[in-house]
Image (tube, rainbow, N blue to C red):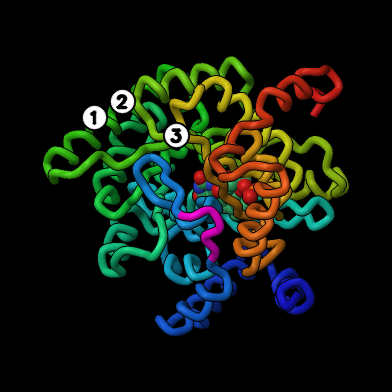
Amino acid sequence: MFYRSIARPFLFRLEPETAHELALRMLKVALGSEAARAAAARRFGREPFGALARFGLRFANPLGLAAGFDKNGVAIKQLAALGFGFIEVGTVTQHAQAGNARPRLFRLPADRALINRQGFNNRGAAALAARLKAQGRPPCVLGINIGKSRVVDVADAVPDYLASFELIHPHADYIAVNVSSPNTPNLRELQRADALTALLDALQRRNRELAAQYARRPVPLLVKVAPDLDERELELIVDVARRAQLAGIIATNTTTSRAGLRTSARVVAAYGAGGLSGAPLARRATEVIATLYRLARGALMIIGVGGIFNAEDAWAKICAGASLLQLYTGFIYEGITVARDINEGLARLVQQHGFRTLDEAVGCQAEKLLAVSHQPSALAR
Ligand SMILES: Cc1cc2nc3c(=O)[nH]c(=O)nc-3n(C[C@H](O)[C@H](O)[C@H](O)COP(=O)(O)O)c2cc1C
């Protein structure tokens, strides 16, 4: 209520990225003390399904904050206090970089959407590693998302990712390999089977070496994919991911599509290039999750992301095959109660549909969903 009637109208009057920076700063100050975070955690933290076991980690609840919100890991403890079961920081790159010229983030309120072309603005993997070392472990699962530095040619991506990996691996509960942002030239080429195999194999090799060196288990590795891939491309990615023994796939990143928007085409065109997130992405992301679920046959965990605003949206992704969920745009539109509201609503939905646990419901509608989406009318998206 407070967010929708007071905070959001205020923030939405500001330039979007300025609003983002201000909100992050306010959060850091308001939840700066241990006592304030404990009070927030009591108010927002929910564990409706008990601890969820996923790729060797335990999640208090299935809803995480997606990559891009806290790129430099400056407010992890504060965000965890808002009830997220996990936080994915980044994308970070080996080299610190400014990203694209501003403005590069746009709101489409009529569509409950955002368009961004930030281009991995971040202070670099070494700075993130130093901050995480100084801060100590956060009170929830921490994922770190790594990407390619802009100054590095896509042909030389492997050593660039490896450099980030080496810097951040001691601090990550899991590592997400981002090959799907539309805002770094040619990055999405790394989703092709040959390039992806080379990248993931190299990261896993180093992962195992480091695990042996430090006498611990390898860090779970996941790959984050675009929603703009067809079934054949998804099949190849699942194949590569399985052979590289990945823990899972994060589906999906933002889309380059502009289909079906309510915002006028003239306004959308004026915003220019970038990735679209939020409600218009929801259905496509859910289809990708169902496709991956069917292809992976339990061998890979799927983190479902794209257009989750409420418990029903979250439920649709669980039923499609996601074992964990993330959101970004939903946080901007729904505010600080979003994790609590979704977790509480999800618990009710699981019960209403007659399941005893969340895990029982994972993938329960995948086949049905794919049968519907393969009818010609539904394909026109
Ligand atoms: C402003 C903005 C910045 C983002 N930055 C990143 C990023 O750095 N790395 C990444 O993997 N995804 C990034 N994303 C994508 C989100 O993590 C998420 O995959 C996508 O927005 C779909 O989820 P949503 O509809 O809940 O926002 C960004 C999204 C937005 C809106």
Dominant SS in magenta: loop
Instruction: Choose between 253 and 185: the one closer to the eye.
Output: 253
| In the rendered image, the vertical position of residue 352 relative to residue 252, given as above or below | below
- What secondary structure is marked by label 2? helix
Residue 181: x percent and y percent? 54, 40
Write down the region rendered in magenta.
Answer: 46-50
Whether residue 292 is in magenta: the answer is no
Q: Of the numbered discs in the image, which one, if any, rests on residue 353?
A: none
2 and 1 marks in contact (CB < 8 Å): yes
Query: Tag 1: residue type?
Result: Arg
Residue 8: x percent and y percent? 73, 71
Q: Earlier in the sequence, mark 2 or mark 3?
A: 2
Packing grade of label 2 (10 A; few <14, some 14-19, many >=20) is some
- Does the image show residue 275? no
Q: Earlier in the sequence, mark 3 or mark 1?
A: 1
- Does the image show residue 336? yes
Q: CA distance from mark 2 to mark 3?
A: 15 Å
The residue that appears at 83% across and 43% down in the rendered structure is 261
Residue 118: x percent and y percent? 56, 51
Image side of residue 240 versus residue 216, left or right: right
Q: Quadrant of the C terminus?
A: top right
The residue that appears at 49% across and 22% down in the rendered structure is 237
Instruction: Choose between 96 and 77: the one closer to the eye.
Output: 77
Q: Quadrant of the N terminus?
A: bottom right
Q: Which residue is mark 3?
A: 248
Q: Is mark 2 within 8 Å of ligand 1?
A: no
Q: Which residue is mark 2?
A: 201
Q: Which residue is mark 1?
A: 205
The residue that appears at 54% across and 18% down in the rendered structure is 235
Query: Tag 2: residue type?
Result: Asp
Q: CA distance from mark 2 to mark 1?
A: 6 Å
- What secondary structure is marked by label 1? helix
